[in-house]
Image (cartoon, grey):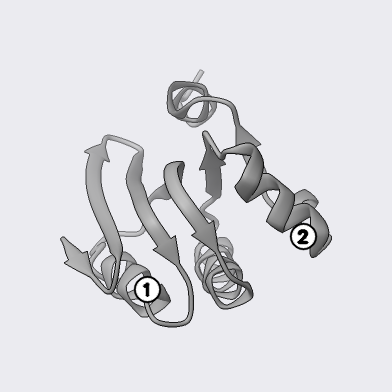
């Protein structure tokens, strides 16, 4: 799916939905992610794979907080995975990186959500 320079691929797993983001998440595209998130009928945990995300603006980060808050209200989690150094730097400059749980790989995030 391609809207305003943001591609989103959705992958369903038993206990999580993974959204792989590619391109830019900013004021002209963050609503695309929010609409994709709203398509989830039954709330599950969400993992955002950021390996192909090239840029995120403060508006994009705000949309991640909105998704995170909606999930937490339903006792679900939002995990970030595979963020590049550039994306981490943007979060860090805004002093927001510690607000999210991040994993080096999508598989690590999925394992964290697997019942033991």
In the rendered image, which residue does mark 1 sit on? Answer: 34
Residue name at image x 52 percent, y 22 percent = 108
Residue 9 pos. (x, y %): 23, 49
Q: Is residue 52 above or below residue 55?
A: above
**Image quadrant in which the N terminus is located:** bottom left
Along the line of sight, the residue nearer the viewer: 66 or 89: 89
Residue 35 pos. (x, y %): 29, 75
Residue 101 pos. (x, y %): 66, 43
Residue 32 found in image quarter:
bottom left
Q: Is residue 67 above or below residue 47?
A: below
Along the line of sight, the residue nearer the viewer: 13 or 97: 97
Total marks in image: 2
Q: Is residue 29 above or below residue 94?
A: below
What is the crowding at mark 2: few (fewer than 14 residues within 10 Å), some, or many (at least 20)?
few
In the rendered image, which residue does mark 2 sit on? Answer: 96
Residue 80 pos. (x, y %): 55, 44
Residue name at image x 55 percent, y 57 percent = 75
Say left or right for 60 vs 1.
right
Dot 1 falls on a residue whose secondary structure is helix
Task: Work out how far the residue at label 1 is from the one at label 2, CA to CA, in angstroms.
Answer: 19 Å
Which disc number belongs to residue 114? none
Along the line of sight, the residue nearer the viewer: 70 or 7: 7
Residue name at image x 50 percent, y 62 percent = 71
Task: Judge whether residue 99 can be spotted in this image.
Answer: no
Task: Judge whether residue 63 can be spotted in this image.
Answer: yes
């Amino acid at each position: 799916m391609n809207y305003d320079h943001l591609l989103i691929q959705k992958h369903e797993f038993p206990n999580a939905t993974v959204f792989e983001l590619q391109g830019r998440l900013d004021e002209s595209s963050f609503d695309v992610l929010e609409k994709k998130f709203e398509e989830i009928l039954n709330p599950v945990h969400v993992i955002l794979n950021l390996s192909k995300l090239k840029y995120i603006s403060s508006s994009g980060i705000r949309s991640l907080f909105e998704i995170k808050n909606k999930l937490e209200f339903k006792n679900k989690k939002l995990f970030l995975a595979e963020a590049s150094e550039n994306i981490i730097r943007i979060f860090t400059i805004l002093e927001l990186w510690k607000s999210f749980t991040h994993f080096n790989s999508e598989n690590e995030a999925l394992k964290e959500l697997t019942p033991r």
